[in-house]
Amino acid sequence: MQHHFLSLPVSRRHWLLRTGAGLAAGSIALGAASGSMAQTTLATKLKVLVSFSILADLVKVVGGDAVEVSSLVGANEDAHVFEPKPSHAKTLLGSQLLVVNGLDFEPWMTKLVRSASYKGKTVVASQGVKPLTMQEDGHTETDPHAWQNPLNVILYVNNIAQALASVDPAHAADYQARAQAYVQQLQELDSWAQSMFKEVPKAQRKIITSHDAFGYFAQHYQIQFLAAQGLNTESEPSARQIAKLVQQMRREKVRTVFLENMSNPRLITQLSKEAGAQVGATLYADALSAPDQPGATYLGMMRHNIDKLAQSLKP
Ligand SMILES: [Zn+2]
């Protein structure tokens, strides 16, 4: 929570600057640069708007110098409870490509696109991912947190490369090459994670977090995650739900509870006290960290999460 308040004024200021720059440069025609190197200047960068910080990193990796990326929901901020402002509509209107997660992660996006009268291209980064579902309050919900499995992010990166190429065909080969190089890094990350968790007996792979953000991670690495909140952070759990989770933690001897970088720590603190478990590291769930922290990039946040989880689970 503290994080959240600290980061807000900075990102606001950032937004105002970006909006001004976006509108000024938006009038320069794309793809008009035929041949002349001099025309590949700052002003001709492709303006890409993404819904949240993790996508911003992926677009920067694939887009390189050819793109200028803005994110609606910033580092350490919670996309589940985001409320777009008129300034966000303005930024969207000045963008040439919109990248969203999909899988119902951004329920506020439809309204924003409509209110901005945005007519540009939109790409759903998670397209092609096999969605996981969860039973919540008696109905089936789609789990939006697909980026928590690095192999899904291979699809994200390929979708992003394709979308960038369709809006900016002049740089298509560059986008493709950067995506390919990054896919290799994702595969290396996955192999490393597999080797880290191999040392932990499956019966001991149990983790508690604030909300159900780790379903794809859990399935892929065969770790059981229990959460105090459901798939989004909007509703607070009831006293009865918390009591039930505490009972389960005691029964299954869960030793560590983990904080999330964009969630209120109060719930986790309460759980640790009631169940006699220790509070572990902060995991990066739905947002990157500030630039000077380990979760400043997607690869950084995943390495941090895997390292902290494996450390706490090791016998
Ligand atoms: Zn979430």
Image: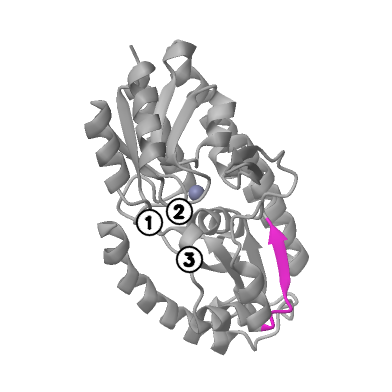
CA neighbours of label 3 inside 10 A, class few (<14), some (14 to 19), many (20+): some
Is residue 163 one of those drawn in magenta? no
Residue bearing mark 2: 235
Kindly identify the amino acid type of the residue bearing the numbered disc 3.
Phe
CA neighbours of label 2 inside 10 A, class few (<14), some (14 to 19), many (20+): few
Kindly identify the amino acid type of the residue bearing the numbered disc 1.
Asn
Residue 52 is situated, as x and y percent measured from the top left of the image, at 51, 60
Task: Give 102 or 30, whichever is nearer the viewer.
Answer: 102
Q: Is residue 164 above or below residue 288?
A: below
Q: Which residues are magenta?
A: 117-124
Residue 282 is situated, as x and y percent measured from the top left of the image, at 32, 41
Is residue 123 one of those drawn in magenta? yes
Residue bearing mark 3: 82
Residue 214 seen in render: yes
Question: Residue 76 bears which disc, if any?
Answer: 1
Residue found 64% across the figure and 45% down from its top: 141
Residue 254 is situated, as x and y percent measured from the top left of the image, at 35, 22
- Image quarter where the N terminus lies is bottom left
Q: CA distance from mark 2 to mark 3?
A: 14 Å
Badge 2 vs badge 1, beta-carbon distance below 8 Å: no
